[in-house]
């Protein structure tokens, strides 16, 4: 090994979901929304003046932050935006988790959390979810350097009620508590309603799932003025121009059409309910999903076998070869047509295996 190689920061990177590009495929592995963004987004995209792209975007992304503040009825100084919720969360880890005590997040959750902790040399512990994949709130009562809870959780799809979230915050008044709500629009109540009560609470959301804009990379957070100011100080010390002009303007347009947003999320939740019933008839079991995906295990066929069988039919779902969840598939809820195709392949395969 060369001398300079010894000084390279070495981390085990986050592994994103596969992004295949195969004609005729059905892509149900990365929890993208199967429906297009609001119609106003497409219209705004046509109106963007390319001459402005030679200029830097507004570093404060004021147009977007002001629109988010009005939409969610919070103060303009209580909103932070970034390049997807990953950027917002990574910035939050860097900003708020600087004590010698370990931060806490569940052993089964979004797998980027431990990557950021390793990258930023943040000590961490992962309290185990119970046998039903639920949070044991008592595990978060001990002294720590911060708490991160994905709610609803990924990949388990489980939503914890606000009284559980409130209880965890109540027992952690001397550190920052982050609630990651990437999937909250599919069946939960946001903890953003609690930021008026707790100045140490940061609530993170995204345009990637419910607003069909994963490709634009728009994430945002709500918190007290102190938290948002601290986030901005770190952001401006690292990269002032995180949000590009196109994302800012299209994000604003997406927020204008509340009816379309509600229609899309409703279609997904209706399809989810129907598919859960059909999967149950085929011998699958799963938690009660409050997300745009189903976390399913079969009564006698191993998950990896089903994953491979579906892949051979050009249907992509997510399989995690990890302890405690290596017999589950995470299946994104697609269109009714896509889910019909999934069920058809599963029926045929399970019938052959009986």
Image: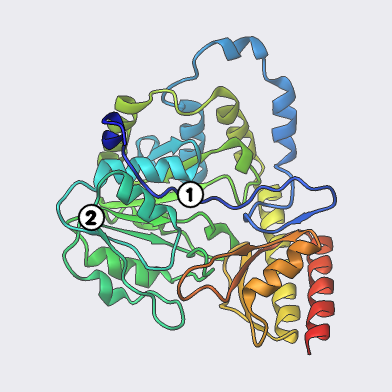
Q: Nearer the viewer, residue 260 or 318?
A: 318
Number of callouts in the render? 2
Q: Are marks 1 and 2 in contact (CB under 8 Å)?
A: no
Whether residue 289 is visible, yes or no, is: yes
User: Which quadrant of the structure image shows residue 217?
Assistant: top right
Residue 136's x, y, as percent? 33, 77
Residue ID at (66%, 47%): 19
Q: Which residue is mark 1?
A: 205
Residue 38's x, y, as percent? 71, 41
User: Which quadrant of the structure image shows residue 52?
Assistant: top right
Q: Is residue 117 above or below residue 143?
A: above
Residue ID at (46%, 27%): 61
1 or 2: tag closer to the N-terminus? 2
Residue ID at (50%, 41%): 84
Give the CA separation, mark 1 to mark 2.
25 Å
| 93 horizontally vs 151: left or right | left
Q: Secondary structure at mark 2?
A: loop
Residue 170's x, y, as percent? 24, 66
Q: Which residue is mark 2?
A: 123
Q: Quadrant of the C terminus?
A: bottom right
Residue 182's x, y, as percent? 51, 54
| 143 horizontally vs 121: left or right | left
Tell which tag, 1 or 2, sits nearer the viewer. 2
Mark 2 surroundings: few (<14), some (14-19) or many (≥20) residues within 10 A: some
Q: Nearer the viewer, residue 280 or 206?
A: 280
Residue ID at (79%, 68%): 342
Point out the residue furthest to the bottom here.
Answer: 354
């Amino acid at each position: 090994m060369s001398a300079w190689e010894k000084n390279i920061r070495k981390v085990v990177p986050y592994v994103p979901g596969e992004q295949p590009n195969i004609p005729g495929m059905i892509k149900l592995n990365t929890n993208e929304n199967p429906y297009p963004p609001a119609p106003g987004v497409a219209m705004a995209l046509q109106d963007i003046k390319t001459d402005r792209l030679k200029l830097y975007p507004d570093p404060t992304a004021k147009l977007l932050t002001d629109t988010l503040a009005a939409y969610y009825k919070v103060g303009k100084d209580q909103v932070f935006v970034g390049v997807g919720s990953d950027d917002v969360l990574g910035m939050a880890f860097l900003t708020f988790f600087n004590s010698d005590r370990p931060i806490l997040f569940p052993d089964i959750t979004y797998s980027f959390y431990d990557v950021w902790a390793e990258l930023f040399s943040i000590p961490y512990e992962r309290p185990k979810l119970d046998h039903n994949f639920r949070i044991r709130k008592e595990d978060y009562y001990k002294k720590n350097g911060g708490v991160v809870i994905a709610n609803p959780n990924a990949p388990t799809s489980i939503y914890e009620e606000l009284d559980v979230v409130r209880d965890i915050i109540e027992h952690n008044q001397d550190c920052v508590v982050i609630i990651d709500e990437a999937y909250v629009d599919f069946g939960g109540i946001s903890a953003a309603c609690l930021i008026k009560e707790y100045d140490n609470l940061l609530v993170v959301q995204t345009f990637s799932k419910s607003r069909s804009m994963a490709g634009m990379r728009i994430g945002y957070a709500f918190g007290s003025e102190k938290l948002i100011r601290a986030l901005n100080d770190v952001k401006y010390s690292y990269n002032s121009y995180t949000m590009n002009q196109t994302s800012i303007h299209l994000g604003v347009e997406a927020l204008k059409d509340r009816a379309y947003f509600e229609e899309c999320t409703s279609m997904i939740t209706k399809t989810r309910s129907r598919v859960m019933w059909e999967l149950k008839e085929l011998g699958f079991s799963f938690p009660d999903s409050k997300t745009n995906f189903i976390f399913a295990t079969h009564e006698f066929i191993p998950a990896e076998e089903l994953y491979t069988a579906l892949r051979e039919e050009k249907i992509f779902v997510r399989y995690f070869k990890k302890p405690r969840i290596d017999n589950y598939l995470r299946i994104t809820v697609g269109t009714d047509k896509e889910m019909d195709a999934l069920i058809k392949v599963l029926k045929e395969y399970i019938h052959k295996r009986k």
